[in-house]
Image: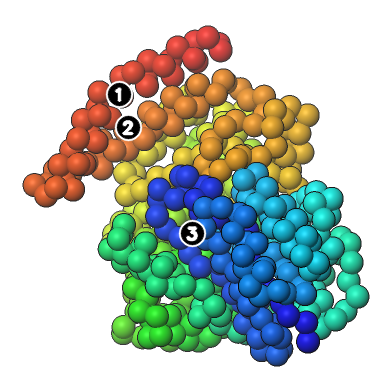
Amino acid sequence: MARVLLAHNYHLPLDPREARAGKPYPPLGTLVSAAMAERAGHDLAVYDPMFTPSVETFASSLDGHRPERVAILADPHAVAQKMCLTSMRDAAFTMIRLAKERGATVLVAGPDTSDRPEMYQSAGADVVVVGEHDTPLLAWLDGAPLAGILPRTPVMTNLEALPFPAWDRVDMPAYAQRWRAKHGAWEVNVSTARGCPYRCNWCAKPTWGRTYHVRPAEHVVAEVRALVSRHGVDQIWFTDDIFGIKPSWLAAYRKCIGDTPVPYRCLTRVDLLQDAAYVADLAASGCREVWVGVESGAQHVLDAMDKDCTVEEMRRASGLLRDHGIRRGFFLQLGYPGETVQDVLATARLIRELGPEEIGITVSYPLPGTPFHDRVKDQLRATNWEAAMDNEVLFASEYPQAFYDAARELIRSEHALIRFEPDVSRAGARRAAGAMYHLCRWPLQRAKLAIHARRHA
Ligand code: SF4
C-alpha cells in the first residue's frame, strides 16, 4: 500500500484573532479520516500544523515521511475553515506545491475547496473533492483512479459507522496546555451530527448542503467518556451547526450520560429553546453555555435573512436559559442589506434588555453559494477575509465601514457595562479598568454612529 500523509492547512499563528482567543481544537474532520484510513489498513502519518508559524515547515514532514500520497483536508467542522480565509488558502497552495515538488500525488478537500475547486486544481492538486470527503478519500487511498475535480458524492447517512477521531495522531498535551494556561480548563470538540436543515440565506453549507444526519446518543457519550478517561479533557465543545435538534435525541443523551455529565458548550437556535422541559434537559445533560444566532433586534432584518425566528422567541429562549443557569452567547450580525441605523439601535436595545453573558459581532459576510452572495455579488469589493473576524464589509453596503466599526464598538461597550460586576480580585480590577474604558468611549461611539447616520440620511 502507498505511504500516505494526511494533513490540514489551518495554521493558528496565521489567524491572529483566533490565536489571541487561545481556543485551539484538534482538527476533528482530519482525525476522523485518519481513523478511517487506519481501520482500512493504510500506512499513515498525520501532519498537524495548528501551532506551526511557517507553512514551509511542511517540507520537513514530507522529507521525513516521504509519502506517495498526500491529502490536505481542511476541517469541515471548524468555523474558521468554513470562513474560507485567504491566509489558509495560501497555506494550502504552498503545501500543495511542496508535496508536488517531492513527487507526491495530492488530494485536497474542505469548505474552500468546495467553493473554489478550480483554484485548487490550478494550484497543482491532482484530485479536488467537492463536498464531504470521506468516501472519495478512502476510494482514492484504495487505489481508485480519481483525478481532477470530483463531482459531489452523496453524504454519509450512517454516522454510527464513523470511528472516533485518531486523537493519538496529534499532540494532545499541546492543546491541553494552551487551553489550561489561558482558560483554566481544557475543551475538545465533538461532533454529534453533520449538516443543518435550516435555510438562513447567508449561511454557506459547502460540505453537507441542507442535509442533516445525527449519531446515536450512546455513540456520542462513548466518545465523550473516552476523551475524559484517555486524555483528561475537562469539557466539550459540541461543534454541530445546531446541537440537539430533536428533543428525543437530547433526552437520550441525558439518560445515557447519567448522573455524572461532562460539562459542554454548544450552538443552537432560539426557536428550539421555547420549551422549559427541553432547556431543563440541556442543563441536566451538562450544558453550561449555549450560543445562538440572534443576529438582529429588528424583525424585518431577521425575515430578510430567512432566519425563521422571531424577536419574541429570543426573549423567551434567553429567559429559559438564564433560569436554568446556562450561560448565553449571542451572535450578532451588522450590515445585512436593508438594515438601518434604527435597526442597529434596536439590536443594541435587545442586548441591554436581555443581558447575555457573551456576544460575538460580525459584519455580514457573503459566502459563495448562498442567496445572500447572489444578491450582492455585483457589488463585491473583495471576496474573502484574510483572517477570522476581519469584519471588513466586502460589498457596497448601506453605510460606510466606519459606521459598522462604531456600531460594533458601541454594542460592545454597552455590553461590557451591563455585564460589569465589581469584585476585589486582580481579574476584577482588570474588568473594572475595561468597564471604565468602555464608559469613556461610549459617548464617542454613540456620536460617531449619529454622525454617520446623518451623513447617510
Ligand atoms: S441555523 Fe445556523 S447553521 Fe443552520 S442555516 Fe441557520 S445559520 Fe446556518
What amino acid type is highlighted by mark number 3? Phe
First in residue order: circle 2 vs circle 1: 2
What amino acid type is highlighted by mark number 2? Ser
The spot of residue 188 in percent (x, y) is 44, 69
The spot of residue 124 in percent (x, y) is 82, 56
Residue picked out by circle 1: 441
The spot of residue 145 in percent (x, y) is 91, 75
Alpha-carbon distance for marks 1 and 3? Answer: 35 Å
Q: Nearest the camera: 180 or 234?
A: 180
As drawn, the label of residue 51 is: 3
As drawn, the label of residue 413 is: 2
Alpha-carbon distance for marks 2 and 1? Answer: 7 Å
At 28% from the left and 30% from the top, the residue drawn is 438
Q: Nearest the camera: 344 or 451?
A: 451
At 69% from the left and 32% from the top, the residue drawn is 382
Q: Residues within 10 Å of mark 1 (few under 14, many from 20)?
A: some
Q: Residues within 10 Å of mark 3 (few under 14, many from 20)?
A: some
At 69% from the left and 64% from the top, the residue drawn is 72
